[in-house]
Image (cartoon, rainbow, N blue to C red):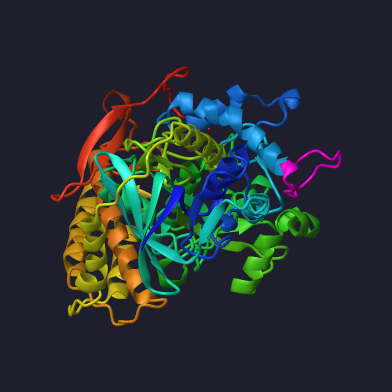
Amino acid sequence: MIIDHDVIILGAGLAGLRAAVEISRKSDGKVNVGLVSKVQLNRAHSVCAEGGPAAVLREEEGDSYDLHAWDTVKGSDFLADQDVVYRFVETSPMELLLLDHWGLPWSRRDDGRILQRPFGGHSYPRATMAADKTGFFEMQALYDHLIRYQNFTRYDEVFATSIIAEGGRFCGLTIIDMATGEFQVLRGKALLIASGGLGNLYGFTTYSQTVTGDGQAMAYRAGLPLEDTEFLQFHPTGLVPSGILMTEGCRGEGGYLRNKNGDRFMEKYAASKMEVAPRDIVSRAETMELIEGRGFTGPKGLDYVHLDLTHLGADKILHRLPLIREVTMKFLGLDPIKEMIPIRPVAHYSMGGIEADIDGKTKMDNVWVAGEVACTSMHGANRLGANSTAECLVWGGITGAEILKYLGTNPKMPDVPEDRAKAEEKRIFHDLMESEGNENPYQLKEELRQVMDFHMGVFRDGQEMSAGLDKVRELKKRFKNVKIEDKGRIYNSNLVNALELENLLLLSEAMIVSALAREESRGAHARRDFTTRDDDKWLKHTLVRFTDDGPKLDYKDVTITKWKPVERKY
C-alpha cells in the first residue's frame, strides 16, 4: 500500500514536532503532513530531557550572542562551524519566547522573568528551565499547539525500515505498522529525518531503549554521508547501576563531585569551572579518579564517585530538582536531600550525524534533517549542555520553513519503484523473518554493547579500537544467521529488535572506523596513544559513506569566521 503526503516527518520528538508546527502554522494547515513515530506520540526520548535549552535572554545583565557563541566554539574544541553556531545563538531566544507564548510553564525568578541556571562550559547562567522536567514540558507545549491544526496524520508505533531514493531524490519511506503488521510505503515530496540519536549502541547509557539510530542508519544505506561519528559524548553523571541521567542541572544548582576520600576532585582538572566544566573534561576527570583508585567499587564493574547535593537543602532540591529526587528514591531508595548519589560517566549524545548544511539540508534533493540525528557541524567535538534541546527547536523551525519554501516550487509527487518496495518487504518478512539461523539477536545486541562500552569509552587507543572493530565485524557476520522466533506480524518486537540491531551494527562500524583514523585527542575523542589536539592534520570534519566493502572516509574543512583555535583551558 502506498500512502501520499506532501511531507513526511520521521521522528516525533522535539525537532520533528517543532517542524510540524512550523509547517502547519506557516501554511495555515494546508500542507499534508505525515508524522511518523516509533512510539506513541509524546513518548519520544525528548521527554527525558531534564536540564533545559540554552539561550541569551539577559543581554542587559551581561550575557551576549558573542559570549554564547564563544562558549560553544571553545566547548566544541574548535571543530564547530562558526557560522552555524552564530545562527543558533541568534535564533534560540526567539524559540524559547515562542514556547513561552504557547504555554510552557518555565520556572520563574522572583521578578517574574524566566529562570536560567549555570551549565557546564557556559560563562553565563543561560540554561532555561522548567524545574528538571524541561523536555517533557517542551513536548507538551509543541503538541498542544500542533493539534490546533487538522493537516497531519499520526503514524504511532510505526517502525521505518528504509528510505527509497532514485536519482538523488527521496521517493518513499517503507514502514511496518506494528499494530497490524502491515508493510506500507509512505510517499512524499519531501522528507525530514528527525529520529534522534543512537545511545543504545552502549550498555551503560542514558537513552531510552527505543533510541537505536534507525534514521541515521537508513540515511547511510540510502547514500547520505555521516559526519563526525567518532564524537560520542559521555555525560558525567549517569546513575549507577541503571545509567539514568542525573541532569547537569544538579551541578548547575551547586552540586559537588566527590571521590571516596570526600575530596572535590574537579579542582585538579578545571579549577576555574569546577563541576560546571564541559562534559568531556568532567567525564575524563571522573574516569581518572576511578582508574587511580579514588572511586567506590560498584556492581558489575560500574565503579563510581559521588554526586553530592546534600548541602543544597531540601527546599532547593524539591523546587529545582524534583525529578532527580523522585528517580533516586524510586530506583535506589536513596534521598539526595540526605545522601550522596552514586554516578559515573555514561554514554549520552552523538555530536555526529547525517551531514547537513546550515539550513539542515542534506545532499539529497528533497531531504532535510534536524535534531540529534543531524550534523550541521554545530557541536564539533563536544556539545555544551543545554545546547541540544535548543538545537532541536532551532532547526525544527528552520527545516520546517525550508521545506515549505521547497513545496512552494510545486515539486511533483515522486514515483516509488515498485521493485524496490517489494525487495524491502521480502528482505524483512522472508529473508530475515523466515531465516533458520541459530543466532539470538538479543545475545548479539548484548555483545555489541559490551564491545562499545569496553573499546569505545571515555579513553580510547588504536589497539583497543582495532580489536573492537574486529569484534563488530564478526557480529555483523553472525547477524546473517539470526533467528526470529516470533513468526507473527502483530507487535512483533522480536523482529523490530533484530532490525534495530542491524542498524546499530552498521553505525558502530562507521563510528569505530572514523575514530581509528582520527589520530589526535579532541573533545570527546580522547586517545591514550595520541594525547594532544593536532590542528595541522585534524582540524577537519570526518565524512563516512556506506559501501558494500565497508565505510569509506572523506573529510571537509571547518568553517572558521571569527575565532582561530587556541589551547582549551578552564
Residue 126 visible somewhere in the drawing: yes
Residue drawn 18% across and 68% down? 480
Magenta stretch: includes residue 111: yes
Residue 114 spot, x, y in % from top left? 76, 40
Q: Nearer the viewer, residue 146 or 244?
A: 146
Residue 529 visible somewhere in the drawing: no
Name the outermost residue toward the left. 549
Tell whether 178 sits left or right of 44. Answer: left
Residue 202 spot, x, y in % from top left? 38, 60
Quadrant assignment for the N terminus: bottom left
Name the outermost residue toward the top. 562
Magenta stretch: includes residue 562: no
Residue 282 spot, x, y in % from top left? 50, 45
The answer to whether residue 320 is above or below residue 544 is below
Q: Which residues are magenta?
A: 100-114
The answer to whether residue 242 is above or below residue 45 is below
Residue drawn 40% across and 48% down? 188
Please tell me how many numbered marks the rendered image carries. 0
Image quadrant in which you'd find residue 566: top left
Q: Nearer the viewer, residue 551 or 20?
A: 20
Residue drawn 35% across and 50% down? 216
The answer to whether residue 131 is above or below residue 367 is below
Tell whether 82 sits left or right of 424. Answer: right
Tell whether 75 sits left or right of 552. Answer: right
Magenta span: chief secondary structure: loop
Q: Nearer the viewer, residue 50 or 277?
A: 50
Q: Nearer the viewer, residue 428 or 105?
A: 428
Residue 439 spot, x, y in % from top left? 22, 76
Tell whether 524 sits left or right of 336. Answer: left
Image quadrant in which you'd find residue 494: bottom left
